[in-house]
Each structure stands twice: as structure tokens, then as C-alpha cells.
Amino acid sequence: MTNGMDNDAFRALAPNIFCRSCASPLVQAADWEQEEEPLWGVRLWCPDCGFEQAAVLDRAQLLYLSLAVEEGFAWMLDALAQLNVANFATMDPDLVQRARTDRIGPAGR
């Protein structure tokens, strides 16, 4: 499913968020909680160095962060699709489709 936008054009517009400690581009929003009507409290976390920072964001900043999260997720799905193509013989061929449609369950133990 597409929204009519060229993926490369969208990626050129999507923001990047970097860790203040190690400059990693993998910063994640770990918790989101509405503070007051226009403000949200967010805990940002870097999986590379473990740096955490709490932030209070307004609507525009929250949109910026949301776009960065969506862009990171899109990059992850692209990488997963490439991995799926490279390892098609040994990997579940439906893995990418299940990831795109939120149908991946927890791993069995």
C-alpha cells in the first residue's frame, strides 16, 4: 500500500534524531505520556550507549519525533526485506509481511 508519495522524497524530508551522548541515530522514544493538553512527556533512550533523557514536547516537536520514529521503522522494514531476500531459503518467507501487518507474536521458549 502506498500513499502516493515517492519513498525517496519522503525520506529526504524525514527528521533525524541523534543521541546527545554518543551521536547514534538509533534514539528511541521509550515512554510517552500526556502532561497537559498540548504537552507530552517523553523518555528518550539510546540503545547504543544507554543514555536516557526525559523531555517535555509540544505538538510540533511531538510530530517531529513521531516522523523520526516512523522513518526508523521504515528503514528497519527495508533492512528486514533485504535480509529476507538474501536468506530466503532458510528464513520464513512471510516474515516481512507479518512485520508490516503487526502479526508477529512473541518467540516461543
Image (cartoon, rainbow, N blue to C red):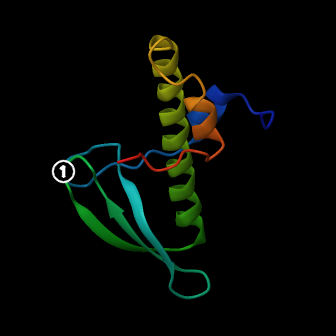
Compared with 12, 17 (above or below) is below
Image coordinates for residue 40, horizontal then vertical, percent? 51, 77
What residue is at 50 percent from the left and 57 percent from the top?
65
| Left or right, 5 with reference to 95 | right
Quadrant where the N terminus sits is top right
In the image shown, does 3 or 76 lie closer to the viewer?
Answer: 76
In the image shown, does 39 or 30 lie closer to the viewer?
Answer: 30
Compared with 77, 93 (above or below) is above
For disc 1, the marked residue is 49
In the image shown, does 98 or 19 lie closer to the viewer?
Answer: 98
Compared with 7, 100 (above or below) is below
Q: Amino acid at mark 1?
A: Cys
| Left or right, 23 with reference to 30 | left
Q: Residues within 10 Å of mark 1 (few under 14, many from 20)?
A: few
Image coordinates for residue 41, horizontal then vertical, percent? 44, 77
Query: Furthest residue to the right?
Result: 4
What residue is at 42 percent from the left and 46 percent from the top?
107
Image coordinates for residue 63, horizontal then vertical, percent? 59, 60
The tally of labels here is 1
What residue is at 66 percent from the left and 29 percent from the top?
7
| Left or right, 24 with reference to 55 | left
* Mark 1 residue element: loop
Query: Furthest residue to the bottom?
Result: 36
| Left or right, 48 with reference to 56 | left
Image coordinates for residue 102, horizontal then vertical, percent? 61, 47
